[in-house]
Image (tube, rainbow, N blue to C red):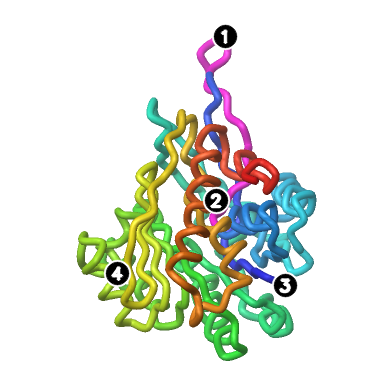
Amino acid sequence: MDILSIGEILIDLTQTGVNAKGVPLYAANPGGAPANLSVAAFRLGARTAFIGKVGDDAFGRYLTDVLKKDGVDVSALAVDAMHPTSLAVVSVDANGERSFTFYRRSHADTMLMEEEIQDFLLKQAHMVHFGSVSLTAEPARGSLLSAIRRARSYGAVITYDPNYRARLWDDPREAIIVMRQPLPLVDILKVSEEELPLLSGSEDWEEGSRRLMEKGIPLILVTLGEAGCFYRLGHLTGRVHGFPAKVVDTNGAGDTFFGAALSKLCREDLSRLSQERLEDILTFANRAASLSTTRAGAIPSMPRLEELE
């Protein structure tokens, strides 16, 4: 397979309005950054698989069906009979920016066990992708880090999106320590402009990415919202501008960007990747992310290849 994603999968409860009595109405959208990326990359031409854990409940069955219908291999998606599917309540402001309230302490996605991430799947994957939300709690944290070390030993390209969600951490200092821990294992890193200083200690794109490069990361992507992205490929740096859009909902835009980029990068040799080719790929990723912000939800908003060609 091209890309194997490991980590959280959950329900995003997003307010869609209120009823006649003023009671808020919510849509139960599929979510979880690694799951989102699996769909985004598949819709744009990559073969993808996902490993995570859902509850033995209606939400868990719904999430499994969503990934299946979108072509993602979920043969290794675990089901937990003891813990419910995780939830996130997503609030979207007038500018389309979102905030999260999570219901996932002792929920299914945090209960992923090491033995549920089998070696044969790690050996099949060209890329293995993960995020930091699954690093917030055990046993998922240890299971994920073990899987990434094993995948790297088998020759997989390791990709990391450290989504910082302050409400999931008891202590911001612990969050920074834990989120930095996997960096020496990573080949492609995607961070937001806000997350860059957490990982590098610098808000400056050039300096922050240089410090991350010194940890052995060949390709670093810094997303800048509608302004596009900054990149560092070894000692080469540059900026690729974004595409203006009438924003409805930014939820899932970063996952769409990274999924789009990886759908192309999974067919490239990083050691031979030219600056010109990288900028073409990032232009494609920026277009995909921009289009996703014009629609509501994370997975529901993600474009298909024919919309971008």
For mark 4, what is the residue?
Answer: 209
Please state which of residues 211 and 50 is positioned toward the viewer in this rendering: 211
Q: Amino acid at mark 4?
A: Ser
Q: Secondary structure at mark 2?
A: helix
Q: What separation in Å lies between label 3 and label 4 (alpha carbons)?
A: 29 Å
Q: Rounded to the nearest whole Å, what is the CA distance between mark 2 and mark 4?
A: 22 Å
Query: In the rendered structure, are the residues bearing label 2 and label 1 in contact, judged by CB atoms less than 8 Å apart?
Result: no
Q: Which residue position holds label 3?
A: 1
Q: CA distance from mark 1 to mark 4?
A: 50 Å
Specify the label residue 5 is tagged with: none
Residue occupying the point 54% across, 55% down:
33
Instruction: Say whether disc 3 or disc 4 marks the residue closer to the N-terminus.
Output: 3
| Residues at discs 2 and 3 in contact (Cβ within 8 Å) | no
Residue position for label 1? 20
Given residues 38 and 242, the one toward you in this image is 242
User: 88 above or below 38?
Assistant: above
The answer to which of marks 2 and 4 sits earlier in the sequence is 4
Q: In the image, which disc is placed on residue 256?
A: 2
The CA span between labels 1 and 3 is 49 Å
Gap in Å between the C-alphas at discs 2 and 1? 35 Å
Where residue 280 sits in the image (x, y, percent)?
Answer: 50, 58
Question: Which range is magenta?
Answer: 18-33
Q: How far apart are the two marked residues, 2 and 3, measured between alpha carbons?
A: 19 Å
